[in-house]
Image (tube, rainbow, N blue to C red):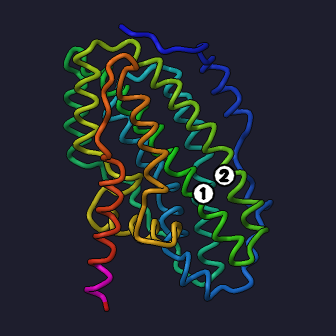
């Protein structure tokens, strides 16, 4: 099995650092919005989407228990710390959208889809559990990278809307925590990949290429919601700026350096589909 180049990351120390960072205190956040109407019109979709995906980590934890019932202690520890930090992120965005006159977010917290249940059954097949753990870690890295890039775009939009306080006290510390979460997922994914046989890696890659959706976009409606968010953040119907960094993560994790394999641009294709669904829904509502 091929080993990854470079010095190995002390993943346990990384989890220690993430845990020591703690959760963001809502009392430290500046929710000032000089022009609530403009925020509602230009960023309402993004605020709601971020609120939902951050709060839906409750369901993600349940899914992990179904898909990876034999997850190791370090994975379980990280998930506990991750949930403790992600939930306040959701509460912050929920509070912000209510401050500008939007209704609170309505996250899906309990429903576990059939695909996850099937994966849970398959996890008991010899060799499949290890591939599923790699899939979980690699998609975690891709999702965290997409979220972080989204926060970079959101910060730019907030500054344009005259909201430096919220950008500095909410988005910047949230972005910093997402970077640490990404570092964990990526490092743990590389470590797990180096334990896989060739067939396990190829299985994981095939599943990811065929099933990838942006974070939280689990249904056509949620895909359209993500499309609206992408347009709001990027300022156009071209999501390439969001897709490119995530595609790089996929290329890095789902292939081995010596293979010379180039993945198709599946991330951009999935993001373009969300924008198309958003525009289609928008046309119906007009």
Determine whether the residue tagged by mark 2 lies in a helix, strand or loop: helix
- Relative height, residue 77 to residue 48 (above, below): above
Q: Which residue is mark 2?
A: 174
Q: Quadrant of the C terminus?
A: bottom left
Is label 1 in contact with label 2 (beta carbons under 8 Å)? yes
Q: Residue furthest front?
A: 260
Q: Main secondary structure of the magenta part?
A: helix
Give the magenta part as a residue range: 281-285
Q: Residue 4, which numbered label?
A: none
- The spot of residue 150 in percent (x, y) is 54, 57
Front disc: 1 or 2: 1
Residue closest to the eye, 201 or 94: 201
- The spot of residue 270 in percent (x, y) is 31, 54
Name which residue lies at 56% across and 52% down: 149
| Residue 282 colored in magenta in the image | yes
Give left or right: position of 245 versus 27: left
Q: Give the mark count.
A: 2
Looking at marks 1 and 2 on the same chain, the residue that comes earlier in the sequence is marked by 1
Name which residue lies at 76% across and 76% down: 32
């Amino acid at each position: 099995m091929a080993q990854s180049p470079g010095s190995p990351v002390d993943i346990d120390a990384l989890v220690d650092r993430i845990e020591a960072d703690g959760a963001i205190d809502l009392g430290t956040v500046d929710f000032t919005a000089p022009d609530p109407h403009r925020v509602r019109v230009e960023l309402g979709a993004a605020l709601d989407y971020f609120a939902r995906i951050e709060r839906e980590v409750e369901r993600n934890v349940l899914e992990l228990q179904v898909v990876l019932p034999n997850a190791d202690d370090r994975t379980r520890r990280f998930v506990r710390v991750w949930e403790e930090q992600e939930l306040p992120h959701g509460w912050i965005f929920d509070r912000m959208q209510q401050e500008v006159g939007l209704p609170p977010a309505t996250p899906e917290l309990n429903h576990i889809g059939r695909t996850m249940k099937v994966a849970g059954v398959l996890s008991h097949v010899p060799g499949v559990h290890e591939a599923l753990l790699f899939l979980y870690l690699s998609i975690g890295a891709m999702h965290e990278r997409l979220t972080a890039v989204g926060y970079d775009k959101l910060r730019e939009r907030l500054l344009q809307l005259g909201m430096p306080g919220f950008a500095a006290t909410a988005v910047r510390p949230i972005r910093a925590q997402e970077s640490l979460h990404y570092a964990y997922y990526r490092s743990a994914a590389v470590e797990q990949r180096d334990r896989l046989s060739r067939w396990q890696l190829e299985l994981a890659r095939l599943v990811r290429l065929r099933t990838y959706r942006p974070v939280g976009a689990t249904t056509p409606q949620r895909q359209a919601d993500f499309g609206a968010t992408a347009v709001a953040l990027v300022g156009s119907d071209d999501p390439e700026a969001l897709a490119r960094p995530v595609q790089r993560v996929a290329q890095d994790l789902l292939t081995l350096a010596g293979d010379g394999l180039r993945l198709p641009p599946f991330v951009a294709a999935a993001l373009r589909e969300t924008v198309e669904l958003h525009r289609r829904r928008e046309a119906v509502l007009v």
